[in-house]
Image: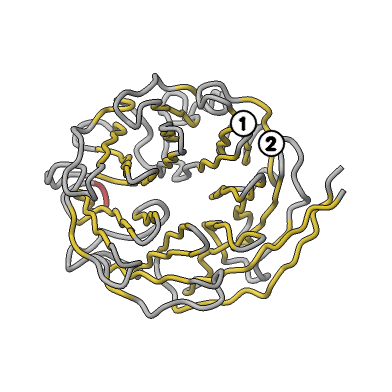
Amino acid sequence: MITFLFTLIAATASAAPGGFDVYADRGRLHRLEGASGTEVALNYRRSDDGGSTWTTPVRVDGGRFAYRFGAGDARIMAEGDTLYALWSRSGTGPYNSGPLAVARSTDSGRSWQPAASPSDEASFGRRFPALAISSGVLHAVWLDRATNSKVLTSHTADGARAWSSPVTLDPDVCECCWNTALAVGDGAVYALYRGKNPRDMDSVVSRDGGKTWSKPATAGAFGWGFSGCPHVGGALASTARGIYALVWTGKDGNAGLYVFASQDGRTWKSPAKLGGAGAKHADLTSSGSRIAAAWDDGGEIWGAVSDNEKTWSKPRRLSGENGEASHPRVAASGEGFRVFWEEKDRLADAMLGLQATR
């Protein structure tokens, strides 16, 4: 039996963006930030000490403002000294969303240059982009609202100078939930998104670096019939044991968060429920053999850790008691995980350290 010993370091805060994304790579933390409202300027910060200190903000967007910055509206990805940011610009789509924009840095985020977009320049509704990278190949996944809502993907192997022709992964999906992508070293690429009828989470996988894709498979077949907009996506992580999908359902009697495991990204099993019926807006990541999840529930942020898909530590509250914390992101940091979240008008975080004993 494994017991997890947590070290909860007091949360810190920074001047609060309206949205953020965070990514861990090779001991560094990378953060993309934007203010609330529309026509949002995007800034980048880096931490080389696990999130204790951060560099001075650097402008990313080059005047190509984001249409807004909430959960899943903009993404950052890193591989060594090369970084990418992907977001939706203003246009004529839902909430004034438009085409996708990309920026690239080759000097660890000190400077940023515009790069080619994976989508066309049409101004209507390219939303909720996701990024994944492996061995220099960058993959983008996004929603296209030009007609009905469909999920598309494209990839680039030349530093976002040119992208492959977009491929439709699913022609009819939920219109308002963020997407997730994950690339692993064997050429496999996974995407997770919310289906439409029913509104369960669906997954697709490519075994050839994004050239061809499987048909959609359900990650958590709850059969949730719902005609509205949940505004809740999922998350993906991997270890040597397999792939993990963190999904949320609002179905009566099953509402809440679940982690499913898979060997192939097609067949999902061993569901583990995290938190109670109010658990929502979650993220998942891995470090070595361990996976960590964070979520909000009633305005509080909670976290838990596992070294297999079945046994999880007792959830720990990470935020204070003001009841205004939401939308956490979790990133590997040193021997543990650092969790970031939105709280009132600021961005807060806490370190979730651990040591496994038998």
Q: Amino acid at mark 1?
A: Ala
From this view, report whether residue 262 is shown above or below residue 117.
above
Q: Which mark is residue 83?
A: none
Query: In the structure shown, which secondary structural element does the residue marked by tag 2 occupy?
Result: loop
Q: Is residue 82 left or right of residue 264?
A: left
Type of the residue with mark 2: Glu
Splitting the image into 4 quarters, where does residue 148 fall? top left
**Marks 2 and 1, how far apart in space?**
6 Å
Residue at 46%, 38% in the rendered image:
184
Residue at 42% over, 27% down: 204
- Horizontal side of 296 relative to 353 (left or right) equals left
For mark 1, give the secondary structure: strand
Residue 239 screen position, x and y as percent: 60, 40
What kind of colouring is applied to the model shown?
secondary structure
Asked if labels 1 and 2 touch by Cβ distance under 8 angstroms, the answer is yes
**Badge 1: how crowded within 10 Å, few (<14), some, or many (20+)?**
many
Quadrant, the N terminus:
top right
- Circle 1 is placed at which residue position? 261
Q: Is residue 25 visible?
A: yes
User: Horizontal and vertical percent for residue 202?
Assistant: 46, 28
Image-based side of 324 in relation to 77, left or right = right
Which residue is under mark 2? 309
Q: Is residue 138 above or below residue 52?
A: above
- The x, y position of residue 150, in whole percent, is 29, 31
Against 35, residue 196 (above or below) is above
Q: Answer with mark 2 or mark 1, whichever residue precedes in sequence.
A: 1
Return the x and y of residue 42 as percentages of the image width and height. 30, 67
Quarter residue 193 falls in? top left
* Left or right of residue 248, residue 158 in this image: left
Q: Is residue 222 visible?
A: no
